[in-house]
């Protein structure tokens, strides 16, 4: 079932990237970039039998960073930093 979903996501991804490159309004471009990153996250989740945690974290970090300021009652930048910090090797 993953392959048909991935094919549709690939099509949506191509449309989203094209639209983002053509969009001049910053708010609309940000929405399209968020959609693009979300589609990358879907691809990362479904492309392999076991998603790569590091790749998922990178996309989550990017999504949270881009969404910072869009949700008033959450500090998404701090959440993004937490995701990023979980990728760093532990200090000795």
Image: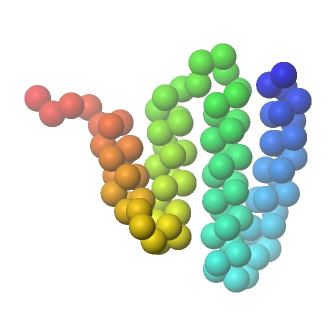
Q: Residue furthest bottom?
A: 25
Q: Quadrant of residue 86?
A: top left
Q: Quadrant of the N terminus?
A: top right
How many marks are shown on the rendered structure?
A: 0
Q: Quadrant of residue 46?
A: top right
Q: Residue furthest front?
A: 73
| Residue drawn at point x = 36 percent, y = 45 percent | 84
| Residue drawn at point x = 80 percent, y = 25 percent | 2
Residue 4 x/y as whole percent: 88, 30
| Residue drawn at point x = 71 percent, y = 64 percent | 32
Residue 76 x/y as whole percent: 42, 59
Q: Eyeballing the image, is 90 above or below 30?
A: above
Residue 65 x/y as whole percent: 47, 60
Q: Residue furthest left?
A: 92
Q: Quadrant of the C terminus?
A: top left
Task: Name the side, left or right, on which 50 lies relative to 65.
Answer: right
Task: Name the side, left or right, on which 3 lies relative to 48.
Answer: right
Q: How is the image coloured?
A: rainbow
Q: Eyeballing the image, is 83 above or below 44?
A: below
Task: Name the side, left or right, on which 72 lies relative to 12.
Answer: left
- Nearer-the-camera pick, 17 or 39: 39
Residue 23 x/y as whole percent: 76, 76
| Residue drawn at point x = 53 percent, y = 70 percent | 70
């Amino acid at each position: 079932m993953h392959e048909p979903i991935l094919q549709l996501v690939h099509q949506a991804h191509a449309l989203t990237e094209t639209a983002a490159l053509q969009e001049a309004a910053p708010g609309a471009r940000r929405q399209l970039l968020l959609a693009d990153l979300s589609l990358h996250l879907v691809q990362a989740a479904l492309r392999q039998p076991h998603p790569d945690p590091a790749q998922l974290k990178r996309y989550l970090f990017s999504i949270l960073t881009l969404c910072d300021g869009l949700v008033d009652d959450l500090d998404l930048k701090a959440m993004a930093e937490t995701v990023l910090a979980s990728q760093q090797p532990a200090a000795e």
